[in-house]
Image: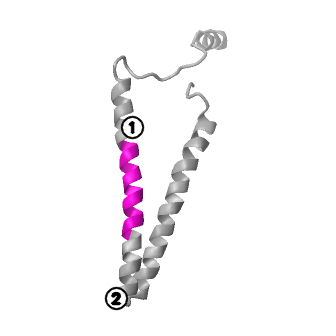
Amino acid sequence: MTTRATALFTSLPGSICPQAPPGAQQYADQLMGYVLWGVGMLFVVGVVVGIGGAVAGRVFGMPHASKASVVAIVVVFVAVIGYLVLPGIVRAMTGSGCV
């Protein structure tokens, strides 16, 4: 039995690389472009809202609102750093994407 299983296992291809169906790559690239722009805009909106909250907290005398807004701005910047660093880590872990 083991020789048959070994023969079956060795007849499998060496690597399997996922590929998009013909003609689908342009749509996948377009979708990823929309997602990247959307995430970038969310980062910008997060910083603007955080700055607005900090200013409003100072103007209206609400120190807790100002502190929460500063924390929100820091969280946005940490998310931006993670957004730039994590894809490189995942790419290094997965290699070429072939199994």
Magenta-colored span? 35-49
Q: Earlier in the sequence, mark 1 or mark 2?
A: 1
Is 50 above or below relative to 29?
Answer: below
Distance (Cα) linking label 1 and label 2:
41 Å
Question: Please, what is the three-letter code of the amino acid marked with disc 1?
Answer: Met
Residue at 66% across, 10% down: 3
Q: Foreground: 7 or 77?
A: 77
10 Å crowding of disc 2: few (<14), some (14-19), many (20+)? few
Q: Nearer the viewer, mark 1 or mark 2?
A: 2
**Residue 39 location in percent, x, y?**
40, 50
The secondary element bearing badge 2 is classed as loop
Residue at 36% across, 86% down: 59
The secondary element bearing badge 1 is classed as helix
10 Å crowding of disc 1: few (<14), some (14-19), many (20+)? few
Res 60 label: 2
Question: Please, what is the three-letter code of the amino acid marked with disc 2?
Answer: Phe
Residue at 58% across, 49% down: 85
Is 55 above or below relative to 6?
Answer: below
Quadrant containing the N terminus in the rendered view: top right
**Residue 15 location in percent, x, y?**
58, 18
Q: Is residue 47 magenta?
A: yes
**Residue 69 location in percent, x, y?**
43, 75
Q: Foreground: 7 or 25?
A: 25
Q: Say which residue label 1 marks.
A: 32
